[in-house]
Amino acid sequence: MAIKIYTKTGDQGKTSLIGGTKVPKSHIRIEAYGTVDELNSYIGLVSDHITDEHTRIVLKEIQDRLFTIGSSLACDPEREPLMKMPDLREEDVKLLEKEIDAMNEVLPPMKSFILPGGHVAVSTTHVARCVCRRAERNCVNMQQQEVFVDPLVIKYINRLSDYLFVLARYAGHLLNVAEIPWKPRVS
């Protein structure tokens, strides 16, 4: 017999953190890890549109790290989880920086702000970047409200948004799609 996906435990607008603590589904911690989950889905979509095999491998690593971050955010910091939780490491941030630097080596210098668009791979990567920035804002909001969030989570998500911006440019480069410069209307 298959396990049922619905448990009905959330029908009253509450959910459980890892550790068992019940919180409203509107809790900032739920919003943060829900946004990370949304970001992870967009990273999967980006990967589906990217043709470069190395980039696809890196994106799978990023998805793994986002599951790690989601697990961290879903934990009640006051209670020890019964299971061993995956950890985020400084070298995960370094990997993003290394990838950013490698992509920037082949990209022309930016001369203006650029508009998202030109190819679905470029646009989708920019959407992922925007969701990443929202995840970062949620985590910073947690920190400001003195709700525990590992500072490395904020650092990783910040660097990931930089990576996604450069990846959007890099995807356009690989696809021979011209960047769309922003030409502000001035009267």
Image (tube, rainbow, N blue to C red):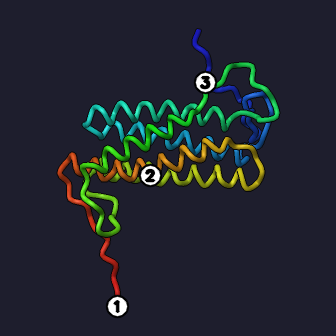
In the displayed structure, does residue 82 sit left or right of residue 65?
right
In the displayed structure, does residue 136 sit left or right of residue 168?
right
Q: Dot 1 corresponds to which residue? A: 187
Front label number (3 vs 2):
2
- Give the farthest residue toward the bottom: 187
Assess disc 3: are there few (<14), some (14-19) or many (≥20) residues with their C-alpha within 10 Å of its C-alpha.
Answer: few
Q: Dot 3 corresponds to which residue? A: 5
Q: Are marks 3 and 2 in contact (CB under 8 Å)?
A: no
Q: Secondary structure at mark 3?
A: loop
Q: Dot 2 corresponds to which residue? A: 162
Q: CA distance from mark 1 to mark 2?
A: 32 Å
Q: Quadrant of the N terminus?
A: top right
Q: Earlier in the sequence, mark 1 or mark 3?
A: 3
Query: What amino acid type is highlighted by mark number 1?
Result: Ser
Q: Quadrant of the C terminus?
A: bottom left
Q: Secondary structure at mark 1?
A: loop
Q: Quadrant of residue 17?
A: top right
Query: What amino acid type is highlighted by mark number 2?
Result: Asp
- Residue 53 drawn at (x, y percent): 28, 31
Query: Measuring 47% from the left and 50% from the top, which residue is drawn there?
Result: 161
Q: Are marks 1 and 2 in contact (CB under 8 Å)?
A: no
Q: CA distance from mark 3 to mark 2?
A: 36 Å
